[in-house]
Amino acid sequence: MSVKPTVVPVFLQLLADRQLHPGALLLKATGLAVDVSESLLQVVMHADFAAIATRLVCLMQPAQTKDWSELQLQCLQQAGCQWLDLEKVFVSDAPTQPVLPPFALWLQGDWVTAPPGRPTASQSTSRALALKLVQLVANDADTRDIEDVFRQDPALSYHLLRLVNSVGMGTSRRITSFSQAILMLGRQQLRRWLNLMLFSARDDDHRAAMLQARVTLRARRLELLAKQAGLDRSDQELAFMAGMFSMLGILFGMPLPEIFKPLQISDVLEAAVLRHEGDIGDLLRLSECADRQDTAALRVLLVDRCITVADFNLINLQACHWMISVVGDPQGKTDD
């Protein structure tokens, strides 16, 4: 009598290309060979994966598929998967801007989360404006005060409008001004897009493209996990914000408590991000386990929240698909 395979977590790791933009997605899973193969095939045969494969190179290490049947390998190839050549991967954990050797196609490592170097005068000004914008948005400031910040740095307006005109916004009408964005989106949705914009608007930060991709993926994953866990719409939105706020320390190179001091954010959001407390704090911890590819801890947290591994894999896939629609291709183009 055959034993039905057990679903194992499938991790989707973003790799940067030579321009330090999101360029590839590495699929990884651990466990018994039959469990890994069935779980990976469930992911790659999903419609969301097909959409992802048109925008990012999807890779798997040959060791993951060495015992697969010819039919299974054909399914992978037809879904758009390629085999990763480890010799073409460069790893960097340094805080300085990575320079890939000529042979490397992909960049891996903790360089994205390394703290930024000592800022120049212009970078300090840019960071001050960004921090001011975070404070105004979090405190639900008057629209005119927010517009004043945008007038001091027109590049911020460009990045915001590029984001809200992406597929992720869910409207066919093109937004051409900040006031129009407020009118169409409403303050709650505008708050979401303004915070996402902060991670893409740092033209002087070599981490910007990958940081935006990572924070978008984390925030959307948390929102979908909150929905799957049965939390209401308000808590789902808080989960999304927790995903973004949890990475502000990486963006600015400052301790999160210091960033949070001037912000009038809800106690629930602050407790979740700073101390991993409450339902949203649990989900943030779960998402961070996924980022670390910590299978054992992830399984425990999924059981605690009554979320199946299969549901997690689907949520991770959906979050990645949404991230690509928001971030666009490596040249910065979004879907119109």
Image (tube, rainbow, N blue to C red):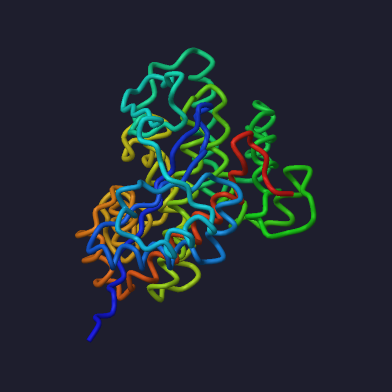
* Whole-percent x, y for residue 333 in the image: 67, 39
* Whole-percent x, y for residue 164 in the image: 67, 48
The residue located at (42%, 72%) in the rendering is 228
Q: Is residue 215 above or below residue 309?
A: above
Q: Is residue 15 above or below residue 120?
A: below
Closest to the observer, 26 or 82: 82
Farthest-out residue, bottom: 1
Farthest-out residue, front: 70
Task: Report whether residue 239 is seen.
Answer: no
* Whole-percent x, y for residue 169 in the image: 66, 55
Task: Report whether residue 87 is seen.
Answer: yes
200 lies left or right of 40: right
* Whole-percent x, y for residue 321 in the image: 54, 56
Quadrant where the N terminus is found in the figure: bottom left
The residue located at (24%, 65%) in the rendering is 299
In terms of image quadrants, where is residue 258?
top left
- How many marks overall? 0
Q: Is residue 161 above or below residue 124?
A: below
291 lies left or right of 160: left
In terms of image quadrants, where is residue 312?
bottom left
In terms of image quadrants, where is residue 103?
top left
